[in-house]
Image: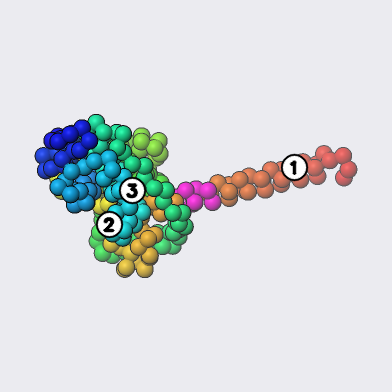
């Protein structure tokens, strides 16, 4: 790090690369590093002479909003800058992300989910097909995708969420890994062999939206997880209702046999 005084940090190329190298050494994915580099680039563009101070950090989020960036993008950029400040030993300069406005999360229907799968098959997009099916049938959070390894799939369980894979999905994942030449480790990886990130996963799924006639906003890992949770809730409600009906039938049969009044 190059610093002119205790109150100013020179955010030059050396500091930027040193920071990103440190992130990489701590296991950050290629997608995460790309996002951090982009955010730090925004910050450098805001700073006169690339000189970062506490006051500049306080003013930066408002400047991003004035440039038209959405709240989630502003918060993502602030989070990256906060990580940089922690790396530089300046935690006291960190800025709290702003609360995001409450918006209604779009819901993916079961029929739309099936259209996504069917479209992926027709277009021969096997990776997208498997991601949609995996996330939609297990509710796996996308950040746990690196845990979907050849070894875990072979065992039929995902230890990260203690969940069993259905037989057909297990076979499809293993067949895909074999065709991709992946004999061990994560099934879903980039060309460089690193686990895919949320941005890539979302892009692969949303690429199906037009042909599947599904709104892009519904074609996300979060909506697939929500579909899984809603389906499980509906099944549990159905099972509970059937169990109650069976119990009431049992009581009626017993009443007819040995009730006090016949």
Q: Nearer the viewer, residue 251 or 176?
A: 176
Q: Residue at x 87, y 45 (%)?
A: 262
* Chief secondary structure of the magenta portion: helix
**Residue at mark 3:** 75
- Magenta includes 100? no
The residue labelled by disc 2 is: 203
Residue 81: percent from the left, percent from the top?
Answer: 26, 42
Real-space Cα distance between discs 3 and 1? 58 Å
Q: Nearer the viewer, mark 3 or mark 2?
A: 3
Q: Is residue 226 above or below residue 123?
A: above
Badge 2: few (under 14), some or many (20 or more) residues near its Cα, within 10 Å? Answer: some
Q: What residue do we see at 36% from left, 49% from top?
A: 135
Q: How many marks?
A: 3
Pick the residue in front: 48 or 13.
48
Counting other residues with Cα less than 10 Å from the Cα at mark 1, is it few (<14), some (14-19), or many (20 or more)?
few
Where residue 148 appears, as percent x and y from the top left, is 30, 41
According to the picture, the residue beneath numbered tag 1 turns out to be 251
**Left or right side of 94 for 114:** right
Q: Residue furthest left?
A: 14
């Amino acid at each position: 790090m190059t610093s002119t005084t205790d109150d100013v940090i020179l955010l030059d190329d050396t500091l930027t690369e040193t920071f990103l190298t440190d992130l990489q050494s701590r296991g950050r994915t290629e997608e995460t590093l790309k996002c951090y580099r982009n955010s730090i680039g925004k910050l450098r563009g805001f700073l006169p002479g690339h000189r970062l101070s506490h006051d500049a950090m306080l003013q930066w989020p408002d400047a991003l909003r004035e440039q038209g960036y959405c709240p989630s993008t502003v918060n993502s950029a602030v989070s990256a800058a906060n990580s940089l400040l922690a790396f530089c030993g300046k935690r006291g300069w960190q800025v709290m992300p702003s609360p995001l406005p409450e918006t209604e999360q779009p819901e993916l229907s079961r029929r739309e989910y099936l259209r996504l799968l069917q479209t992926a098959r027709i277009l021969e997009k096997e990776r997208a097909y498997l991601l949609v099916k995996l996330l939609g049938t297990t509710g796996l959070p996308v950040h746990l995708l690196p845990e979907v390894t050849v070894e875990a799939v072979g065992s039929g369980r995902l230890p990260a969420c203690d969940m069993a894979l259905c037989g057909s999905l297990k076979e499809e994942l293993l067949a895909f890994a074999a065709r991709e030449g992946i004999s061990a480790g994560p099934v879903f990886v980039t060309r460089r062999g690193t686990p895919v990130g949320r941005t890539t996963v979302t892009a692969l799924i949303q690429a199906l939206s037009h042909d599947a006639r599904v709104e892009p906003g519904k074609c996300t890992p979060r909506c697939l997880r929500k579909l899984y949770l809603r389906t499980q809730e509906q099944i549990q409600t159905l099972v509970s209702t059937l169990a109650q009906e069976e119990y009431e039938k049992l009581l009626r049969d017993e009443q007819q046999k040995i009730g006090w009044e016949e």
